[in-house]
Image (tube, rainbow, N blue to C red):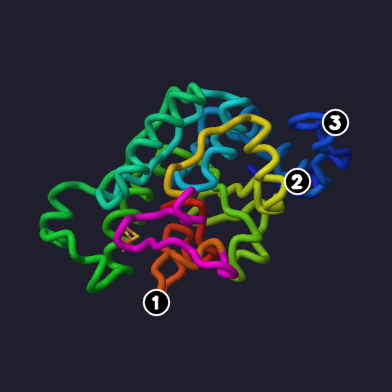
Amino acid sequence: MDLSIAELPQAPLALVSGPDAALSAAEAEGLDLLRRAISDEFRGRIAVVSSFGAESALLLALVAEIDRATPVLFLDTGQHFPETLAYRHDLARHLGLTDIRDVAPARADTERHDPDSWLWHFDPDACCALRKVEPLNAALASFDAWITGRKRHQSPTRAALPLVERLGGKVKINPLAAWSPARIEAEFAARDLPAHTLTAHGFASIGCAPCTRATRAGEDPRAGRWAGRGKVECGIHGGSAEGDVP
Ligand code: SF4
């Protein structure tokens, strides 16, 4: 089953949040793709992968507006900020999402490979593989497609992010790829969405606590992720630009 951008309607969709918030054609294309994927092409066979991070609320709100029962996969690495775990519960309740699934590594695997929870320090790639990549691959086995909140503006590695990708036999959809920071901010405000509390402390992108710092003026939003480690991806995207996931 193919999702082709060329098949999408040419006319922009109705406005999301009012007459002053007309979506660009590219933004509308992503939203239409999201609607079609959840309601039609992959109905019952698609999940959202969310970090419940700084910008997660908008994608989850758009998904909830289509179908609140859409499965949401949260990678519970065991290394999150307490604020993220609280936000995961509060935001899910706020949006009425009914199928949040915590995806965690097997205890036997963490006890064997990272008994002291210090693997992030010595080998972050191995830590991400253990706590994110392998659990997510297992969780995605029952789905044909998944949705991410990645955006082109977030970092140079995402500048050419397509709306639709294929990875490991799955279709991966990036409906907000073309959405601008201004659009995201406007739609976030229009829905009065609750913010992750760490955004008020300079965290523009929020992943695991040991591997995330606040960003500084002039930095890319993701500059605080694995800062100084020479690492920009967690690996769940198979080497493509990393996503809105932990
Ligand atoms: S982001 Fe850091 S703590 Fe989280 S899984 Fe990757 S290396 Fe481990």
- Tell me which numbered mark, 3 or 2, is placed earlier along the sequence: 3
Can you tell which quarter of the image residue 212 is in? bottom left
Magenta stretch in the rendered image: 200-220
Where disc 1 sits, the SS reads: loop
Q: Which mark is residue 27?
A: 2
Q: CA distance from mark 3 to mark 2?
A: 15 Å
Residue type indicated by callout 3: Pro
Q: Which mark is residue 19?
A: 3
Where disc 2 sits, the SS reads: helix
Can you tell which quarter of the image residue 90 is in? top left
Q: Answer whether residue 240 is magenta in the image.
A: no
Where disc 3 sits, the SS reads: loop
- Given the current orientation, which residue lies at the most extreme right position? 11
Q: Which mark is residue 228?
A: 1
Residue 102 located left or right of residue 73: left
Disc 2 residue crowd, few under 14, some 14–19, many 20+, Cα 10 Å: many
Disc 1 residue crowd, few under 14, some 14–19, many 20+, Cα 10 Å: few
Q: Mark 1 and 3 residues: CB-CB less than 8 Å, in contact?
A: no
**Count of all numbered marks drawn on residues in the image:** 3
Q: Position of residue 234 (x, y in %)?
A: 41, 62
Determine the residue positioned at 36% across, 34% down.
Answer: 101
Quarter of the rendered structure image containing ligand 1: bottom left
Picture layout, residue 95 above or below residue 4: above
Quadrant for the N terminus in the image: top right
Disc 3 residue crowd, few under 14, some 14–19, many 20+, Cα 10 Å: few
